[in-house]
Image (spheres, rainbow, N blue to C red):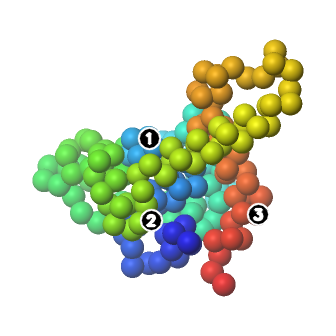
Amino acid sequence: MIVARLLHEDTLELTDRVAGCLVLLYAQPLSRITIITRDQIPRHDNGSLTLRFGTDPATIPEPLAGLIRNLLDTGRPYTGIGCPADTPWLFPGLNPGQPLSAARLGVRLAKVGIDRSAPRKRVHSMREAMRGAHASQDPDDRPKGAETARNTRNDFARTTSLEVVGGLARCFERA
């Protein structure tokens, strides 16, 4: 499983491990992953991390939280000419003051086996499941198409986080 590899294989670059997990576990597009800022990932007094994709924060479970803490603490292993040492971006690019581009991240993740359409496929399956769940409801009580489409990605990230925290993380522990 790719997620287990990303979480536990130290030979992969930390940036790719964290970005790949965010893509696969939270179904966020590369364009959204690359613009995550350090401010979107607060550290709490109990040591936990949350990540804000929309309005509601999603709790980041271990071992992914450990990888993100490591990335926040150590930063990137390379810099471009003129790049400041401090950057607001979780995934800074080589151009000064800019995040890593979605295209470049897509190339990097493809090398570890992640298809850049993975988030879109995951959200599509979520939408299908939601349609099935609402099929038995009164038509006036069903969410409208645009409302469902707009909220699906953020809801999916928050719901997925709760599932991972609630026990799905056991699937990714080393045997």
For the point 67% across and 50% down, the residue is 160
Q: Is residue 41 visible?
A: no
**Residue type, label 3:** Gly
Distance (Cα) linking label 3 and label 1: 26 Å
Q: Relative to residue 164, is residue 99 drawn left or right? A: left
**Residue 17 has which mark?**
2
Up-down: is 107 above or below 10?
Answer: above
The three-letter code of the residue at mark 2 reads: Arg
Amino acid carrying label 1: it is: Arg
Query: Residue shown at 57%/48% (left/top)?
Result: 122
Task: Out of 113 and 51, give the one closest to the viewer.
Answer: 113
Write down the residue under mark 1. 32
Determine whether 57 is above or below 161 in the image. Answer: above
Q: Residue at x 86, y 30 (%)?
A: 136
* Among numbered discs 1 and 2, the one appearing first in the sequence: 2
Comes first in the chain, label 3 or label 2: 2
Callout 3 crowding tier (Cα within 10 Å): few <14, some 14–19, many ≥20: few
Are the two marked residues, 3 and 2, in contact with CB atoms closer than 8 angstroms? no
Q: Residue furthest bottom?
A: 175
| Image coordinates for residue 45, horizontal then vertical, percent | 66, 53
Q: Which residue is mark 3?
A: 167
Q: Secondary structure at mark 1?
A: helix
- Is there CB contact under 8 Å for labels 3 and 1? no
From the viewer's side, name the closer residue of 126 and 32. Answer: 126
| Label 2: element kind | helix
Quadrant of image for the C terminus: bottom right
Residue 167 x %, y %:
76, 63
SS at badge 3? loop
Residue 33 image offset from top left, x and y in percent: 44, 46
Q: Position of residue 90 (x, y in %)?
A: 40, 50
